[in-house]
Amino acid sequence: MKRPGPVRWLHYVYGGVLPEEYREWVLYDATAKTWVLRFAFRIFAEALPWLIAGYVVLTLVTPMPAGMIVAALLISLLLSLFLTVTSADELAEVRLTKHGFPPGTGKAVRKRRGGASTWP
């Protein structure tokens, strides 16, 4: 199974479609026993540049203490993780469909492998 390098992985994280040679890895990514953790890590990786930019902007333009800014950004990260992880099953299916798999492939593969077919 061919894994994408860092640049292609970031393209994948931000919703891009990988070339055909990574198709098996995409299926693995959406159906492995740790697929929800992988999903959550992708959300974190996608949010990190925005969190850093938010921190920089808020420390420069507001008199708020840095600790308060960090706390607010962590709360926003947790909220975004909660909102996306609760839809992880559907979002994984969309990602698989974008890569040429028939709808329902992820759920079927996870069920066949004995993993949870839905989350949470």
Image (cartoon, rainbow, N blue to C red):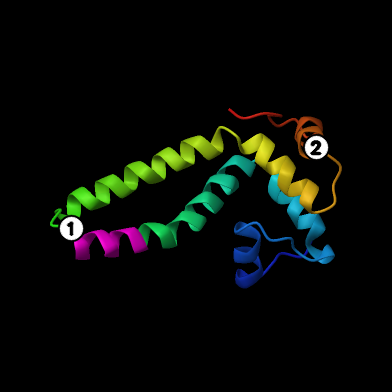
Spatial CA distance of label 2 from label 1 is: 49 Å
Note whether residue 13 is visible.
yes
Q: Does 5 appear above or below 112?
A: below
Question: Residue at the location (83% across, 65% down)?
Answer: 21
Quadrant assignment, res 120: top right
Q: Is residue 79 magenta?
A: no
Q: Name the spot of residue 91 as percent of width and height, x first.
A: 66, 41
What secondary structure characterizes most of the magenta part?
helix
Q: Name the spot of residue 37 as percent of width and height, x first.
A: 56, 44
Residue at image mark 1: 62
Discs 2/1, front = 1
Identify the amino acid type marked 2. Val
Quadrant assignment, res 102: top right
Q: Which stretch is magenta?
A: 53-61
Q: Does 46 appear above or below 74?
A: below
Label 1 neighbour load within 10 Å: few <14, some 14-19, many 20+ = few
Q: Name the spot of residue 92 as percent of width and height, x first.
A: 69, 43
Dot 2 falls on a residue whose secondary structure is helix
User: Which numbered disc, 2 or 1, marks the residue that appears first in the sequence?
Assistant: 1
Dot 1 falls on a residue whose secondary structure is loop
For residue 109, the mark is: 2
Label 2 neighbour load within 10 Å: few <14, some 14-19, many 20+ = some
Identify the amino acid type marked 1. Thr
